[in-house]
Image: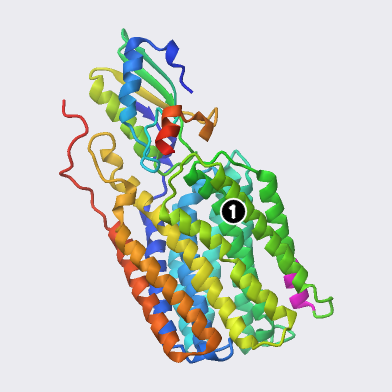
Amino acid sequence: METRSRAESQEVPLDVVVPFYLYAAVFLLISCMMLIFATESFQGHHFQPDLLAITHAMALGWGTMMILGASYQLAPVLVESRLQSPLLARVSFVLAGLGIPFLVYGFYSFHLGWVSQVGAVAINLAVIFYIINLAWSVAKSKTENIHAIFMVTASCWLLVTTLLGLVLLLNFTIDLLPQDSLHYLSTHAHSGIVGWFLLLVIGVGSRLIPMFLISKYTNEGLLWAVYILVNLGLLLLMAVELNPALPDLRFLSLILIGGGIGLFLYYLIKAHQQRIRRKVDEQIKLSLASVGMFVIPLIILCVVITGIEIPRPELVIAYGFCVFFGWLTAIILGMTFKTLPFIVWSKVYRHQSGKYRHPDPKDLFDHHIYRFGMVLYILGFIGFLLGILIKIEFLLIFSAALMILSSILYVWNVLKVVFHKAKHHDKPIRTQ
Amino acid sequence: MINRSELSELERRALVHLHEVIDPEIGLNIVDLGLVYSLSINEEAKSIYVEMTLTTQFCPMGDSILKSVEETLNDYYPGYQAEVKLVFEPRWDAGMISEEGQAFLG
């Protein structure tokens, strides 16, 4: 039998993607565990060693590693070209996987010398290899689409973020910049949050969510408007933050970014309205809801920059917490079980397709554990956020404990999917 | 989408068998999903030719779906040489889902 299959020869190997998922899951657990030991710091200023360590553990170990892994799997779907180098992807995992603990430990112990610098260099190399691989795949693509443009732009912002991070780190020991590193912290954070995470979420979400909903709605013009608004807003924000001589247009920049998010929400609502698949699963519901969650940190940021007389340190910490433990985590928690089971299923059952009855991809994880974990996480998140705002130590500890429990359940479910073995005793589909 | 009125009785039966191939993500069979563009059987040459697409290029499930098509035809038509060709022109869109498929999803 002759079968010509484009997909067959262009599949992304399992060992390229899965290590990223496992690494990220472990880092979510580590980050939640770090919360419980940092409750005192959450009641003070945001520039503290343990808070820096937690932020980077979440942003890099959890968010970025998960997104890099998912990108290697989904980039072919989004850019319509195969992943050009699985080897480069593996190298990027090793570099980032080694670099992140160095960096996080460096921040935690406030050893900003060689320990964190080695970590930052390794992370930058990993990002460069990721961009080379992605750009190479895009260059080989025969079609041009807005999702690929979002992805490439987001990756460039990631490099801007990590390079700036490296320079800020070096600036602690060598005078590289005109002002101290603390002055540039906001620029570093926003290029990462808006440039990397937000643009990537929009680029990937605008393709995957209508695809999972089987929606007839497409509107590339609207996505271009989102792209321009978010990038323009971010460039304006960075320009104002880096050059104090410019008029304070931070509020305008947030309006531009907020406008972009609003249009993206409109896009998702239309896609949802025009869907053919009426029954929407929990993972997609969570992903849809989490997009709207970005509005919370955006409002906090607006309040912070308007200069209203309210305690700012709590708000700045609440902002960071909402971004990493709220918005970003909600998206990833939803999408993990929308992507990982399919990745594993397609490898485990590839050679049994059409021969035996076997579980569906959605049966590879425990839905009860998933739901229970989500409830714990939401309660923990709300409790911790309140704890930051009203400074109640007990509430912070209790909520962190809920989040630890939730992340243990998440890791357990991820492991259940990754180590799923084909069921050999399943009945054949046809018995003749 | 495949034009059923142009199919022979044997081809129509083969198409019915392809209803057993399910898209694992959507849970709907590939025929009602509109993935099968053409199917022809040459009884003299003992060959089956299927032209089909995927909901998206580089679909992670693509390999498994194609394998299922191959296995299904193998089982129902022993002795036949089957060829499954993957095409992306025209591009699949949600409008290609049959009424039965839409009812299943709705």
Magenta stretch in the rendered image? A236-243
Q: Position of residue A119 (x, y in %)?
A: 50, 77
Would residue A232 be found to the left or right of residue A5 on screen? right
The image quarter in which residue B74 lies = top left
Picture coordinates of residue B62, whole percent (x, y): 40, 38
Magenta residue check for A237: yes
Residue closer to the observer: A108 or A398: A398
Residue at horizontal 54%, vertical 28%?
Answer: B89
Kind of residue indicated by mark 1: Gly
Which one is nearer the viewer's eye here, A16 or B19? B19
Q: Give the residue drawn at x 56%, y 91%.
A: A44
Q: Is residue A217 above or below residue A297?
A: above
Image coordinates of residue A345 in percent, x first then y, are: 32, 48
Residue in the picture at 71% in, 52% down? A225
Q: Could you say which quadrant of the image residue A394 lies in?
A: bottom left
Say whether residue A107 is visible.
Answer: no
Identify the residue at image location x=57%, y=77%.
A320
Is residue A362 visible in the rendered image? The answer is yes
Task: Tell whether position A310 is magenta.
Answer: no
Query: What residue would you read off at disc 1?
Result: A203
- Disc 1 crowd rating (10 Å Cα; few below 14, some 14-19, many 20+) is many
